[in-house]
Image: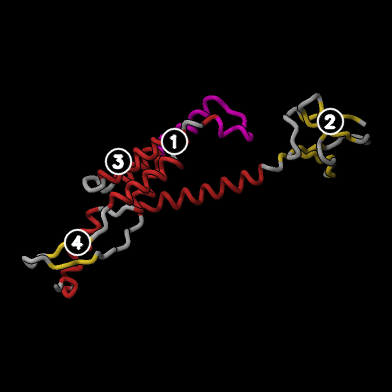
Amino acid sequence: PVWVTMRQSWNDGWTLAVDGVDAGPPVLVDGYANGWVVAPGDGTRSLEFRWTPQRAVRIGLVVSVLFGLVIIGLPLIGRRDTTPLLVAAGDGSDHRVVPPPAGVLAGVAVVLLIAAGPLATAVALGAVLVRRRLPWIGVAVLLSLGTIVATGIIGLHWRRSYSIGPDWPAHFGWAAPLTWAVVGTIVALALIPGDSRWQRGRRRTARTDPTRCAP
């Protein structure tokens, strides 16, 4: 028999298959490594080490990609028409009756600050505040920050040749705030309707349903 050692920190997630047969759970070797006792055999042996938690990581990556595609598609989907309630003024003109956005804005800011951090909160609220003048701000934030994150990760990996493993994402911690800024911006723009959206709904209602403006 011979000891086979995998010099990675001991973990039950490591498995060893000898000629396709599971060698059992690893034992602690040298105070930190994984080891297995392999029975003697004739000729060349086939040893296959496998990190089993990687399957959950792959599933998480697939889910992340799917949600990423959904987030990318949100700014490109036509917005659903929302018709506000109209009332008649004394001069015969109509006015919008909309809930004040300050409470919603503050609630979104608090949630983003806790979940995503100050950078994401600042970018998201800034996009909401300038959306009236720059209606394309959501797409701009998505494309600009998404491009920075993607090119940065690809460029650093290509230049420094990081080893692929459980610690690989730790090399790109700088990308997390930028990614959260994209997510926070899309969520904030979706939850807080813009003035132009309400204005279009008001004009359409006044034109197609004048009874809503009746005193």
Residue type (three-letter) at the residue carrying disc 1: Pro
| Foreground label between 2 and 3 | 3
Where in the figure is residue 52, as x and y percent of width and height? 71, 43
**Alpha carbon separation for disc pair 2 and 1:** 42 Å
Q: CA distance from mark 1 to mark 4?
A: 37 Å
Residue at horizontal 49%, vertical 33%?
A: 153
Tags 2 and 1 touching, CB below 8 Å:
no
Q: Quadrant of residue 162?
A: top right
- Residue at the spot x=47%, y=36% of the render? 176
Q: Quadrant of the N terminus?
A: top right
Q: As shown in the figure, which amino acid type bears the numbered disc 3?
A: Gly
Secondary structure of the residue carrying numbered label 3: helix
Q: Earlier in the sequence, mark 1 or mark 3?
A: 3
Q: Compared to 212, does 66 lie above or below?
A: above
N-terminal-most mark, 2 or 3: 2
- Packing grade of label 1 (10 A; few <14, some 14-19, many >=20) is some
- 168 magenta-colored: yes
Q: Is residue 44 left or right of residue 76?
A: right
Q: Which residue is mark 3?
A: 126
Q: Are marks 4 and 2 in contact (CB under 8 Å)?
A: no
x and y percentages locating residue 135 in the rendered image: 26, 48
Q: What mark, if any, has residue 96 been given in the picture? A: 4
Q: Quadrant of the C terminus?
A: bottom left
Q: Give the label on residue 177, or none.
A: 1
Q: Are marks 2 and 3 in contact (CB under 8 Å)?
A: no
Q: Main secondary structure of the magenta part?
A: helix
Q: Nearer the viewer, residue 10 or 17?
A: 10
Q: Earlier in the sequence, mark 2 or mark 1?
A: 2
Tell me where the magenta segment starts and ends, as one range.
146-170
Which residue is label 2 attached to? 4
